[in-house]
Image (tube, helix red, strand yellow):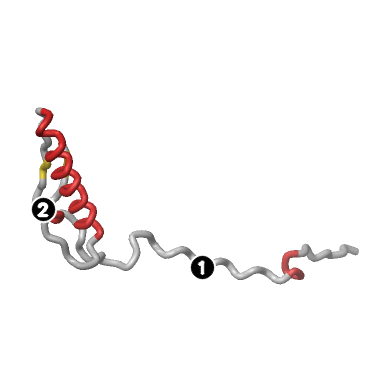
Amino acid sequence: MLIGSVAGLKNSPANLYSATKWAVTGMAENLRMYATSRGVGVTLVNPGMTDTAFGRPASHPSPCPPSPSPRPSASPSASRPTSTSTP
């Protein structure tokens, strides 16, 4: 059994998901032509649309929060301990 998609039956521009599901459909058809003459069945399941976030525009540009800005490096003199003399 192969899992395709209704999206693989009708392609749209720049849709890699549809292209890969179209390939699964083609593979199933080719395998069916070969295997059925030998008594083997081939099943292709093409589920339809499901209400998920897949394909929806993101509510923000990145799924990850932005990285914090690097801390400015301290000057060499600021990182050296200061010596104090006590009388």
Q: CA distance from mark 1 to mark 2?
A: 45 Å
Residue indicated by mark 2? 6
Report the residue at 15% width, 54% height from top. 8
What residue is pinned by disc 1? Answer: 69
Instruction: Inspect the image, locate mark 2, and give the three-letter code of the amino acid beneath it.
Output: Val
Count of marks placed on residues: 2
Q: Dot 2: what SS?
A: helix
Nearer to the camera, 64 or 71: 64
Task: Please identify the quadrant where the C terminus is shown.
Answer: bottom right
Place of residue 37 in the rendered image (x, y in percent of width and height, measured from the top left): 10, 32
Residue at (20%, 67%) from the top-left corner? 13
Viewer-nearest of labels 1 and 2?
A: 2
**Could you tell me the amino acid type at mark 1?**
Ser
Q: Residue at x 34, y 64 (%)?
A: 62
Front residue (pair 55, 75): 55
Q: Residues within 10 Å of mark 2 (few under 14, many from 20)?
A: some
Above or below 73: residue 26: above
Q: Counting other residues with Cα less than 10 Å from the Cα at mark 1, is it few (<14), some (14-19), or many (20 or more)? A: few
Residue found at the very far top of the displayed protein: 39
Rendering coords of residue 22 (x, y %): 18, 53
Side (left or right) of 69 relative to 58:
right
Residue 26 rendering spot, x and y as whole percentages: 17, 49
- First-in-chain label (1 vs 2): 2
Q: Is residue 68 above or below residue 28?
A: below
Quadrant of res 15: bottom left
Residue 53 x %, y %? 19, 57
